[in-house]
Image (spheres, coloured by chain):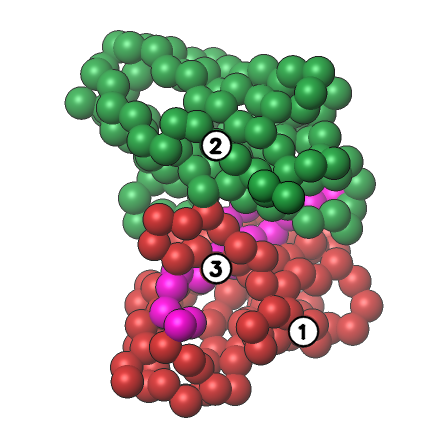
Amino acid sequence: DAGVTQSPTHLIKTRGQQVTLRCSPKSGHDTVSWYQQALGQGPQFIFQYYEEEERQRGNFPDRFSGHQFPNYSSELNVNALLLGDSALYLCASRGGREGGSEQFFGPGTRLTVL
Amino acid sequence: AQSVTQPDIHITVSEGASLELRCNYSYGATPYLFWYVQSPGQGLQLLLKYFSGDTLVQGIKGFEAEFKRSQSSFNLRKPSVHWSDAAEYFCAVGDNAGNMLTFGGGTRLMVKP
């Protein structure tokens, strides 16, 4: 079992550009969440996808958008990048949205905005 | 709104000594509580979780945590720390189904030989 995988590992962009990050959930998982972890801070919830729809959203602007595909993989898109978007972006997956199931995290994508 | 506070940013303990990492949470109902560990360059690994039932929960790697509703706390403990335990530790509270996790700022643990 490969667990949660994310690509790319690292990414460097300039202000104003757009970026797409990808996540493949753990086998058997159908729910994907995205988190942003700035340097020296705890992760912050961006949004969660289930059945190809955004189900919950944290306090992030509309520049952050996502998508979930029929195979449960997911993309995080960030438009009009700002310096403050530099962070580690973590993807987490779980089986369903009911209480009690564990979220498994991927290794993250390190985004640097110059 | 739910929130988590980890009062200790850095903690240094000697190998073999006991460890307690503090976590205080704010949540209106019965919380879903978690402790995660993050090693450099790694994602988050779940150490243990509390949903209901026994307030003392056992986790992996010899860790345990105790839920105290009256103190809104969920402190992580380990009786004897190993050098490999050096890492960043995060406490988190989940919404009513554990979907949206709110994390504390983390505690960086250093282990002296």
Q: CA distance from mark 2 to mark 3?
A: 19 Å
Q: Quadrant for the C terminus of chain A, please.
A: top left
The residue to which callout 2 is attached is A6
Mark 1, Cα crowd under 10 Å, few <14 / some 14-19 / many 20+, is: some
Residue type at numbered disc 2: Gln
Residue found at the very far left of the displayed protein: A114
Which secondary structure lies at badge 3? strand
Instruction: Return the x and y of residue A111 as percentages of the image width and height.
Output: 31, 29
* Amino acid type of the residue that numbered disc 1 sits on in the rendered structure: Gln
Q: Nearer the viewer, mark 2 or mark 3?
A: 2
Instruction: Identify the disc placed on residue B58.
Output: 1
The span picked out in magenta is B84-103
Other-residue count near label 3 (Cα within 10 Å), few / some / many at <14 / 14–19 / ≥20: many
> Quick one: label 2, few (<14), some, or many (20+) residues within 10 Å?
many
Q: Which chain is red?
A: B
Alpha carbon distance from label 1 to label 2: 30 Å
Q: Residue furthest front?
A: A1
Q: Above or below — where is B50 with respect to A89?
A: below
- Which residue is denoted by mark 3 in the rendering? B37
> Are the residues at dot 1 and dot 2 in contact (C-beta closer than 8 Å)?
no
